[in-house]
Image: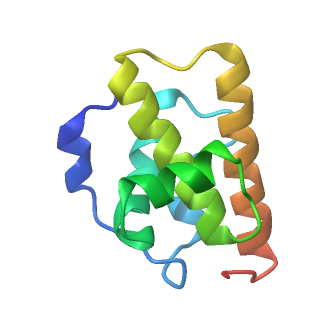
Amino acid sequence: MCDDRHRMKRHISNAELTMDALPKPGADWESVGEFALTFDGYAEHGSFEACAEIANAKRHDSLSDLRTCLFFEQRRWRHFGEIPDAESMSYIHGMVEEIRSRLAAGKID
């Protein structure tokens, strides 16, 4: 399970993001969680509250929104101390695939 030592993972900006950085389709939670921490939604949006607002609304308007939602899910499940359930993993995998799709299309924001 992802823990706080993964917070030391190098930040990857949208411009630097490559397909190789993305977890494989259907990847386990640890792999997805590690990738999620390459983006800091709190820093990107200036506060926990702003990040939470985007994530809880499931706003996927941009690559940054998707990465914010994925980051927040990692933090949410870390806070719960659990691995996401099947429904949550489906949502999480869907976000990773949408990130992959946008990156392939050159839509980096």
The quadrant where residue 62 appears: bottom right
Q: Looking at the image, which is closer to me, 86 or 60? A: 60
Q: Is residue 32 visible?
A: no
Colour scheme of the rendered structure: rainbow
Task: Give the side of residue 2 with respect to residue 55, left or right.
Answer: left
Q: Is residue 17 visible?
A: yes
Vertical arrangement, residue 108 with respect to residue 1, above or below: below
Task: Give the side of residue 52 with respect to residue 106, left or right.
Answer: left
Q: Looking at the image, which is closer to me, 67 or 104? A: 67
Q: Position of residue 66 (x, y in %)?
A: 65, 58
Q: Position of residue 33 (x, y in %)?
A: 44, 39
Task: Give the side of residue 66 with respect to residue 8, left or right.
Answer: right
Q: Tell me which residue sits at (82%, 78%) in the image.
A: 105
Quadrant for the C terminus, please.
bottom right
Q: Position of residue 53 (x, y in %)?
A: 57, 52
The quadrant where residue 39 appears: bottom left
Q: Tell me which residue sits at (75%, 83%) in the image.
A: 106
Q: Tell me which residue sits at (59%, 34%) in the image.
A: 27
Q: Position of residue 22 (x, y in %)?
A: 57, 56
Count up the numbered dots: 0
Vertical arrangement, residue 58 with respect to residue 83, above or below: below
Quadrant for the N terminus, please.
top left
Q: Tell me which residue sits at (67%, 49%) in the image.
A: 96
Vertical arrangement, residue 90 with respect to residue 24, above or below: above
Vertical arrangement, residue 104 with respect to residue 29, above or below: below
